[in-house]
Amino acid sequence: MRGVGRASLIVFLVLVAAGCGSQKMSARHLEGILLRGHAPGLQIRCRPGAGRWDYDCTFSGRAITGSRKDNTYGFDVNDKRVTSQSG
């Protein structure tokens, strides 16, 4: 009886870890999410973030003006969505 309880606890913990976003969204996936619904000329490049942000994404293209630094924003993500952003 004791082994069944321990085994069910292990299965439960594995399922919780799998469902709680143990993996983070990739930079390429974030770029795709940010590009949805925008003009075709917009380009977004994301890389691992500095400081408190998971990713730093730089926006460029026809309608974007200013320096690269002015057009770089930080994003926090979990496994499925953007949780916060700078600016």
Image (cartoon, rainbow, N blue to C red):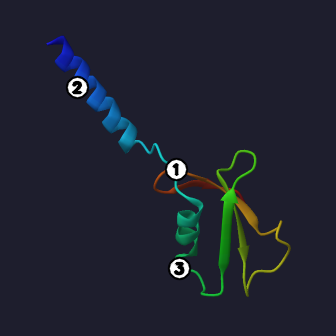
At 19% from the left edge and 12% from the top edge, which residue is drawn?
A: 2
User: Looking at the image, is 84 positioned above or below residue 66?
Assistant: above
Q: Residue furthest right?
A: 67
Front of the two marks 1 and 3: 1
Q: Amino acid at mark 2?
A: Ser
Residue 67 or residue 25, whichever sits in front: 25
The Cα–Cα distance between marks 2 and 3, rounded to whole angstroms, is: 45 Å
- Under tag 3, what secondary structure? loop
Query: Tag 1: Cα neighbours inside 10 Å, few (<14), some, or many (≥20)?
Result: few
Q: Which mark is residue 46?
A: none
- Under tag 1, what secondary structure? loop
Residue placed under numbered mark 3 in the picture: 37
- Under tag 2, what secondary structure? helix
In the rendered image, residue 59, in percent from the top left (x then y), is placed at 71, 73
Q: Amino acid at mark 1?
A: Lys
The image shows a total of numbered marks equal to: 3
> First in sequence: mark 2 or mark 3?
2
In the rendered image, residue 45, in percent from the top left (x then y), is placed at 67, 69
At 64% from the left edge and 51% from the top edge, which residue is drawn?
A: 54
Residue 74 or residue 8, whichever sits in front: 8
Classify residue 39 as left or right of residue 78.
right
Query: Tag 3: Cα neighbours inside 10 Å, few (<14), some, or many (≥20)?
Result: few
The answer to whether mark 2 and mark 3 are in CB contact below 8 A is: no
The Cα–Cα distance between marks 1 and 3, rounded to whole angstroms, is: 23 Å
Query: Tag 2: Cα neighbours inside 10 Å, few (<14), some, or many (≥20)?
Result: few
Residue placed under numbered mark 1 in the picture: 24
In the rendered image, residue 64, in percent from the top left (x then y), is placed at 76, 81
Q: Which mark is residue 8?
A: 2
